[in-house]
Image: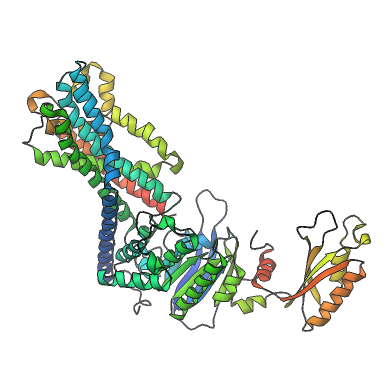
């Protein structure tokens, strides 16, 4: 919990989203769901909110999309105050919610045209735009379908099409690819990239590292209602104590466990010059009966990854342990997350 | 897309834009509901009309036929049945709707995100539910004429007031549906019907005229706390030949119905807002 929100200074768009000391506390809850959060998202930017379930991402999205009222603070969408002028804000925003909330009484095409009608899109334009979006999202022959017969992936596409029907300036995607199969995920990622190229501002919440790294210009890492870090994915990765990460799969030697729980391998790794942090041992699942390999994660600084790797391997073998596998990886957003919050994202 | 950075929250043109947007959204939501109502017309009519028509058949036709009740009873019963239909249909339709909307499917979200004040979404719901109640009540008349045959006797000289009373009754049902549907937790919604609707129905003077209760004084007083009593009595006045019944004074009826509406509507709207905006 070291880093304060890093203000972004290197983008020169007028802000599409501006969040100012926003706090939300639900009645009869001991802690704030969103706790004094401030950030700005530039026009056309794709901005990620990364955090585990319960970090406050959805509450923040709820406030920004006028579905919840802030307890304190202020937020504006393209200049419209979401608390004081929700009607104006609603004209400018589109939402793809975490859970499908499609109107089950309507057919697919009607969902789109009625949504457009709610938003005052002229009658003549509604049909044309619906046809265009259905085409674009691979739903062209589905306009007459009932929603209950659609798979989760297709429902997600309908939700996206609906969110785009009134041509919003700011699009909120709340965990858009959770529960989607890999193919639908890739499809949706392509659509999101296309939108941002078209100049739509996108705020995306996710607990999927890869999604954040691939899609987002900047990422805010949320934990317990607060933003603990905010920067581009590349720069966030440089926040790590070591730029190099090693993953060692080890079965400790016979002597390794003798003095009641002593971690000989871990201690040996900590003594290696250049290694700044050792995580583990984390037992791997599987392999019943036989002594199971455990995983150590090691972070190192310095530029000579090869030397670090060799030294670490030597240290492990020196304790009498068996080294099954050794992987070298650049640190990912997940590592950054664990480093900042001490928790894994999928916990 | 070009006006986004401008922020002029309270200028005149701004609020006129809002009004136009809200009106457009409101009309579109009505359009949506009319479409859905049309699509579900058959099941809706079966749901709302079968029970009252059976009531009318058994109590208005069968019982007098076998000599257990007098023929007069069917004449007394019809206004009560009409009042009940106009009242319960919207109540039930709005409460079931809210069960879906606020529950797992959250189907209402798309309408809540439309550019109109949140309470207007609830107002629209009430209007449409009341409309359903009025249609059901109107259909009860020809059905009753068919069932009761020569026993059907409805005065036609106060049709205007009759329609007005039906509108008030349907709005009352809709507003109580909104209020109860938003006050009661979703898991308890099924209880609403046995714990609230049934007692309302049986203490609401739907099956007996108020004046006839004078022998059971405490019960007669109790019925005065049920708004349905005033609806049933009002309709009795507007439907039965004046010589055949004495009802609560129409002034009292109007005052009580209006008071109930004035209390229930704002309360229900506030409660709705509280439920949908977290």
Q: Is residue A62 left or right of residue B170?
A: right
Residue positioned 28% across, 33% down in the render: B51
For the rendered model, the colour scheme is rainbow
Viewer-side residue, B145 vs B13: B145
Q: Could you tell me residue A272's position as x and y percent?
A: 86, 74
Q: Quadrant of residue A347?
A: bottom right
Q: Quadrant of the N terminus of chain B?
A: bottom left
Residue B222 visible in the displayed image: yes
Q: Could you tell me residue B242's position as x and y percent?
A: 8, 27
How many numbered discs sit on the rendered protein?
A: 0
Q: Quadrant of the C terminus of chain B?
A: bottom left
Q: Quadrant of residue A170?
A: bottom left
Q: Could you tell me residue B151's position as x and y percent?
A: 12, 26
Residue A272 visible in the displayed image: no
Q: Is residue B206 left or right of residue A259?
A: left
Compared with residue B112, is residue A157 higher up or lower down, i.e. above or below?
Answer: below
Q: Could you tell me residue B79's position as x and y percent?
A: 18, 31
Q: Is residue A278 left or right of residue B4?
A: right
Viewer-side residue, B154 vs B266: B154
Residue positioned 22% across, 20% down in the render: B213
Q: Quadrant of residue B30?
A: bottom left
Compared with residue A223, is residue B78 higher up or lower down, i.e. above or below?
Answer: above
Viewer-side residue, A195 vs B102: A195
Residue positioned 43% across, 67% down in the render: A160
Residue positioned 28% across, 21% down in the render: B219
Return the residue found at the far left: B157
Return the residue found at the far front: A141
């Amino acid at each position: 919990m070291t880093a304060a929100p890093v203000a972004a200074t290197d983008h020169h768009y007028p802000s599409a989203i501006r969040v100012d000391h926003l706090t939300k506390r639900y009645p009869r809850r001991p802690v704030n769901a969103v706790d004094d959060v401030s950030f700005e998202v530039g026009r056309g930017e794709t901005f990620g909110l990364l955090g585990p379930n319960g970090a406050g991402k959805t509450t923040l999205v709820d406030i920004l999309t006028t579905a919840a009222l802030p307890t304190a603070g202020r937020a504006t969408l393209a200049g419209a105050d979401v608390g004081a002028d929700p009607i104006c804000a609603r004209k400018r925003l589109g939402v793809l919610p975490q859970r499908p909330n499609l109107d089950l009484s309507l057919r697919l095409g009607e969902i789109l045209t009625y949504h457009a009608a709610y938003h005052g899109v002229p009658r003549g334009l509604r049909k044309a735009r619906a046809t265009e979006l259905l085409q674009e999202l691979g739903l062209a022959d589905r306009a007459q379908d009932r929603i209950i017969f659609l798979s989760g992936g297709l429902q997600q596409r309908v939700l996206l099409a609906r969110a785009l029907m009134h041509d919003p300036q700011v699009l909120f995607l709340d965990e858009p690819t959770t529960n989607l199969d890999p193919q639908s995920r890739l499809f949706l990622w392509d659509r999101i990239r296309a939108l941002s190229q078209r100049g739509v501002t996108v705020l995306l919440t996710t607990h999927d590292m890869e999604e954040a790294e691939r899609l987002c210009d900047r990422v805010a890492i949320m934990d317990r209602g607060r933003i603990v870090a905010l920067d581009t994915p590349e720069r966030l990765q440089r926040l790590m104590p070591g730029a190099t990460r090693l993953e060692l799969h080890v079965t400790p030697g016979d002597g390794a466990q003798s003095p009641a729980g002593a971690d000989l391998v871990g201690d040996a790794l900590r003594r290696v010059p250049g290694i700044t942090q050792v995580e583990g041992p984390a037992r791997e699942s599987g392999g019943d009966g036989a002594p199971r390999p455990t995983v150590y994660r090691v972070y190192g600084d310095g530029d000579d990854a090869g030397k670090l790797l060799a030294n670490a391997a030597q240290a492990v073998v020196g304790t009498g342990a068996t080294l099954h596998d050794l992987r070298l990886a650049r640190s990912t957003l997940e590592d950054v997350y664990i480093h900042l919050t001490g928790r894994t994202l999928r916990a | 897309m070009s006006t986004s950075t401008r922020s002029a929250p309270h200028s005149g043109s701004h609020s006129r834009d809002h009004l136009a947007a809200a009106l457009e959204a409101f009309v579109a939501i009505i359009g949506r509901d009319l479409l859905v109502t049309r699509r579900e017309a058959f099941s809706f009519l079966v749901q709302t009309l079968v029970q009252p028509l059976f009531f009318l058949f058994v109590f208005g036709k069968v019982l007098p036929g076998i000599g257990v009740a007098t023929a007069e009873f069917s004449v007394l019963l019809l206004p009560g049945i009409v009042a009940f239909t106009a009242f319960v249909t919207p109540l039930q339709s709005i409460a079931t709707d809210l069960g879906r909307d606020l529950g797992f499917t959250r189907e209402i979200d798309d309408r809540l995100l439309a550019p109109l004040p949140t309470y207007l979404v609830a107002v629209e719901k009430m209007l449409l539910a009341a409309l359903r109640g009025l249609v059901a009540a109107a259909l009860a008349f020809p059905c009753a004429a068919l069932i009761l045959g020569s026993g059907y006797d409805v005065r036609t000289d106060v049709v205007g007031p009759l329609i007005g009373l039906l509108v008030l009754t349907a709005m009352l049902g809709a507003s109580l549906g909104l209020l109860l549907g938003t006050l009661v937790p979703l898991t308890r919604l099924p209880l609403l019907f046995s714990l609230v609707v049934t007692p309302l129905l049986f203490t609401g003077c739907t099956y007996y005229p108020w004046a006839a209760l004078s022998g059971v004084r405490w019960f007669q007083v109790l019925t005065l706390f049920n708004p349905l009593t005033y609806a049933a009595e009002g309709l009795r006045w507007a439907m039965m030949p004046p010589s055949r019944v004495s009802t609560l004074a129409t002034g009292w009826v109007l005052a009580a119905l209006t008071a109930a509406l004035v209390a229930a509507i704002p309360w229900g709207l506030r409660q709705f807002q509280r439920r949908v905006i977290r």
